[in-house]
Image (cartoon, rainbow, N blue to C red):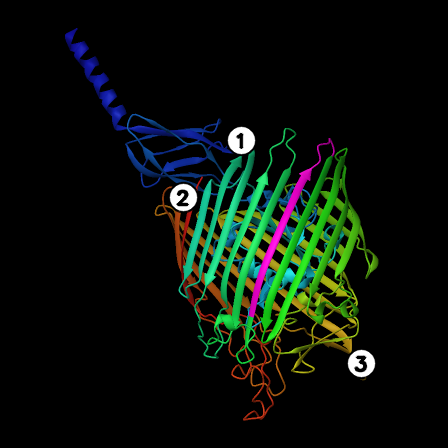
Amino acid sequence: MKVLSSILFFLGAYSLSFAQLTGTVSGYVTEDGSALELAGVALLKTEYATSVDSNGYFSITAPPGKYQLRVSYVGYENFQTEITIVGGENTPLNISMIPLTSKLKEVVVTGSMKEVRKSESVIPVEVYTMKYFNRNPVNNLFEALQNVNGLFADVDNGVANTSDVQMNGLEGNYTMYLIDGVPALNGLAGVYALNAFPMSIIDKVEILKGASSTLYGSEAIAGVINIKTKNPEDIPKFSMNVSLTSMLEANADFAVKYKVGKTNAMLAVSGESFNMRWDLNNDGFLDIPLINSVSVFNKWSVPRADHKVTNFYLRYLYEDRFGGDKTLPSAWRGSNRYYSEAITTNQWQAGLQWALPVKENILFQADYSEHRQKAYYGFHRYHGIQVSGFSQLTWRKKVKQLTEFLVGAVYRVSYMEDNSPLSSDSLTGYKRLAHLPGIFFDNEWYIAKGHVLSIGARVDYSSRSKFVATPRFNYKWNSKNDKNMIRLGVGTGYRVPNLLNEGFGALNGSRSIVVEGALKPEYAVNANLNYTRVQELKGGLLNMDVSGFYTWFSNYIEPDYETDPTLIIYSNNKGATAAGFSVNADFTFNYPLKVGIGFTYTHVFEIDENDEGEIEREVPLHQPPFVANFFLSYSFPVPQLSIDWTGNFVAPMKLAVVPDDYRSPKSPFFTIQNIQLTKKFKKGVQLYLGLKNIFNFIQKDPILRPFDPYNRDIANNNPYGYHFDTTYGFTTTQGIKAFVGFRYVIP
C-alpha cells in the first residue's frame, strides 16, 4: 500500500511539474465568423503544430518561451504573429483570416454613390489604401498618385513645381476631385492643391476612369478621384508618422481619436518644412521650392439610435511656397531683378453628411470652402479668392430586389475674383458669380443572374451653357463564380474652361497669355470596356484587369506653346480624341511575396485647321504615350522586416521648345524607382528607411536662359534670340535622395 501511494504521489508531482514546464496557446481561426476547418497552425522552427477543428478551434502545448506562430490556409493570406507561452498558463488567441480575393470585397462608393463591394459595382472602381501608398512614403497626394496605373503625375512648372495628374491621357483639369463625395480642389484651389493635400487624413482613394458627369457634373470627363477621409470610429487612439530626407525635407503627421460626450471625433495635424536652397544642376534656380505648410482636419461622427449617418468636418490648410533664384531672399518676393514664383495660400472647408431621420434612404450633403491666394510670378503680383458652396439631396430606393434607383438634386454656387484676365467672363465664360443647379437619376436593373444594367442622366443649368444633359449607360456581366467580370460604359461630359486651371502654364511669369476669341464649353463622349479576372493558382492568387477607352471632344482647349515662344495661346479648335488601353496585374503568393505590374498606352491628338483650311492633327505637349509602373513587396516574418521596391517607366513625350532650341523636342525615356525597408517592433512601432530615385534621373535644362530672367540682355551673345522660359520642365530635378521615418500607433 505504501509502495502504491508513493507511486501515485510521484506521478502527481511529475504531472504538476510538467504542467508548470509547459503552457498552451489556443483560440479560434475564422473568416467573417465562419470556421476555417483544417487550417494549419504551427510554431515556426519547432515541431509543435496542429490543425483547426470543425468549430475553428485549435490548441498547442509547448515549453515556455517566445515563438512565431503562423496560420496558413489555401486561398488566404498567411497570418503570423509573435506570442509568449507561460508555463502552466493558457494564451488565448482569436485569428481572423483575410482572403486573397479581399480586393474584390472592398467597399466602394464612387461608381454609383452607394456603398457596395467592389465586385458588385456596375462601374469599375480602383481602390488604393494607405497600405499601398506606404510602399513608397510620400508627403502629399501628388506624390502618392505617381505609381497608379493609368495616371501620370506631370510637373507643370520648373520653378514652383505646380503640377497635375493626367488620367488616360487627359490633363488633370478633366478629372473631378472629390473629398468624401464633395467636389473640391478645382478652379483656383486646383493650381497646386495636390501638392498641398496631406496623407494623414486619407483612409483610401477611389479612382473611377471614364465619363462620370451624370453623377458628378462638370469636369468629370476623364474620371473621378474620390478621397475618402478616415472615420473617427475606425482609427487608432493615437498615430504619428515623421520622416526626413537627405535633402532635409521634414514631414510630420499626427492623428488622435477622442470623444465629446457620445460623439466620436478625430483630429489630424500635418506639417511640412523645407528651407534648404539646393541647386544640384547649377542653373542658379532652386531644385525644390522652399515649403512651409500646416494642415488641420477635424471630423465628428454622431451616433444615432437609427444607425444612420451624421458626420461633419472642418479642414484648414496654410502653405507658403517659394521657388526661383537661389540667391534671392524670400522676403524679396516680386523683385524685378531676381526671378521667383512665390505662392501663399489659405484654405478653409466645412461640411456635413446627414441621413434624414425617415424610413427612406435619403442623404443630405452640404459643403462650404474658401480659398485665398497671394502670389508673385516674377514681379507680377497675383491675388485671388474663390468661394464655393455645395448642397445635394439624394434618395435611393430598392424595389423587389430587381431594381434600384437613385434620384438627386444638387446646387453649386461659386464666386471668384482676382486681378488677372484669365478669369474674364468675356473670354472664357467663367463668371465671377456662377450658379449651377441640377437634377440627376440613375437606375440599376438586375435583368438576369450575373447581368446588371445601369442607365442614368443628368440635367444642369448654367448661365453660360444653359441646359446641358449628360446621359450614361453601363452594363456588367459576371460569371457564376465571380472570377470573371466584364463592364461596359458609355457616357457624356461637358466642361466650362477656367484658365486658372488650364494646362500647365496659365500662371506663368516667362510668357504672356493670349486668348483668341471667347472660349466655348467642351463637350465629350467617352466609352470604356473593362475585363477583370481572378485566378486561383497553385502558388497564390492572380488579379488581372484590362481596359480599353475612347474619348471624343467637339471642342478641346489646349494651350499653344509653339506658335510664338513668348506666348501661351488659348483658342477653340475642331476637337480632339484620346484612345488607348491599360493592363494591370498583381500576384499574391502563398508565402509573403506580392508583385504588381501595370501599363497604359494612350494616343491623344487635337484637330484643327491651318491657314490654308486643311485639317491637322497635333499631339499635345506633356502627354507620354506609354507609362508603366510596378511594385514588389516581400516580408521576412521572423525579424518582422519588409522590403518594398516601386517605380515607373515613362516613354518620351513632346515638350515645349523654341525655334532653334538646343534641347530635345521630346523627353528621354526615363524611370523613377524607389526602395524601402520597414522594421516592425513591439507596441505599434515601425522604423522605415530607403532611397528615392535610385537611378538618379535628373531632367536637364528645365529653364531656358535662367541667368537673364527678364530678358534684359537678349541682344548680347544670343545668336538664336532665346528668351527666358520655364515651360520645358516635366519631372524631377532632385536626383537620388535617402529618407528615414518613424511610425507609432496606439490601438
Residue sitting nearer the eye, 293 or 209: 293
Establish if 612 lies above or below 730: below
Direction from residue 186 to residue 610 in the image, left or right: right
Q: Earlier in the sequence, mark 3 or mark 2?
A: 3
Q: Earlier in the sequence, mark 1 or mark 2?
A: 1
Amino acid type of disc 2? Gly
Q: Position of residue 650 (x, y in %)?
A: 56, 68
Provide the residue designation for mark 1: 34
Based on the displayed image, in which of its 4 quarters is residue 737 positioned? Answer: bottom left
Give the magenta-colored segment's residue range. Answer: 342-360
Would residue 504 be visible to someone looking at this image? Answer: yes
Based on the displayed image, in which of its 4 quarters is residue 151 positioned? Answer: bottom right
Q: In the current view of this chain or complex, which residue is farthest to the left? A: 2
Q: Are marks 3 and 1 in contact (CB under 8 Å)?
A: no
Instruction: Give the SS element for disc 3.
Output: loop
Residue at image location 71% in from the left, 50% down from the top: 390
